[in-house]
Image: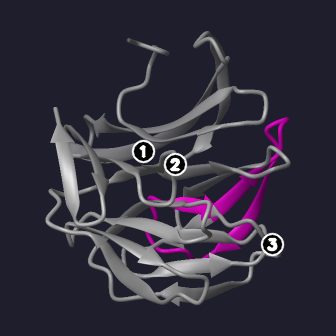
Amino acid sequence: MVFASGDLMNPRGIAFDSGGNLFVVKDSIGFVYDPETGKQTTVEAGWIWKFSPNGAELGIFTDDLTSPSGLVIDDSDNLYVVDSGSILQYDASGNATTFAAGVNATTGLAFDSSGNLYATSSLGTIMKFDPAGNGTVFASGLVNPACMAFGSDGALYVADYGGGTVMKYDANGVGSVFASGLDRPYGIAVLIPEPVSLLLLGLGALLVGKGHLPRRSH
């Protein structure tokens, strides 16, 4: 069933606000050709689209992004997205501020119950940012971490796209392999009953699994 449609090619993240509205971040790459010089320039642009709880398109929430990825909304309906090495914070009216700068390529964002923001990094690390935007390395040693989600047990579950695993981290950043042998896992969501049921999206398939024994359905 199609929930929402529109100019959604290459979506890079989704999140719901407290009112049930869906936000989708997407980027696009285009080319500009200069006939005088014969040179072609790559142009990147990014948007966040907003949809109502019934899937009706409510328009563009913001269109001032370059190459956005990752999307999460806090308890106050502030929206966070990664763009060009920074984590940007948007209020409900679309006003933007820089929450944290100097962030490596990130696809996953998640909040813990204390309001700390976690971000995966292309360097194989997970960064932890306090509510003021101060960052520290929470965990390292991953191959290419993608999306992540917290369980009701407080553990952080991370899809390691490059490693083919789902890692589980406690509050101190101590990790263990929750599931292995996966084919490029990317998207992740914690299901009920928690904490052991997960949804994974990777390579065009839906993976539903517990522990090290995922069940795959296409």
Element class at badge 1: strand
**Residue 180 higher or lower than 200, as above or below:** below
Residue 214 vs 98, above or below: the answer is above
Towards the viewer: 182 or 66? 182
At mark 2, the secondary structure is loop
For the residue pair 74 and 156, the one nearer the viewer reads as 156
Circles 1 and 2: CB atoms closer than 8 Å: yes
Q: Nearer the viewer, residue 96 or 76?
A: 76
Q: Amino acid at mark 1?
A: Glu
> Identity of the amino acid at label 2?
Thr
Q: Which residues are magenta?
A: 87-110
Q: CA distance from mark 2 to mark 3?
A: 25 Å
Q: Position of residue 176 (x, y in %)?
A: 36, 83
Estimate how packed mark 2 is, as few (under 14), some (14 to 19) or many (20 or more) residues with alpha carbons within 10 Å.
some
Q: How many marks?
A: 3
Q: Residue drawn 26% across and 56% down? A: 185
Q: Position of residue 69 (x, y in %)?
A: 48, 51
Q: Which numbered disc, 1 or 2, marks the residue that appears first in the sequence?
A: 1
- Residue 215 lies in the magenta stretch: no
Task: Point out the tag, 1 or 3, that comes first from the N-terminus.
Answer: 1
Q: Nearer the viewer, mark 1 or mark 3?
A: 3
Q: Is residue 50 left or right of residue 218?
A: right
Residue 203 in sight in this render: no
Q: Nearer the viewer, mark 2 or mark 3?
A: 3
**Disc 1 to disc 3, C-alpha distance:** 30 Å
**Residue drawn 68% across and 67% down?**
112
Where is mark 2, residue-wise? 66
Quadrant position of residue 59: top right
Residue beneath disc 3: 131
The amino acid on which the numbered mark 3 sits, given as a three-letter code, is Pro
Q: Are marks 1 and 3 in contact (CB under 8 Å)?
A: no
Q: Which residue is labeled 1 in the image?
A: 44
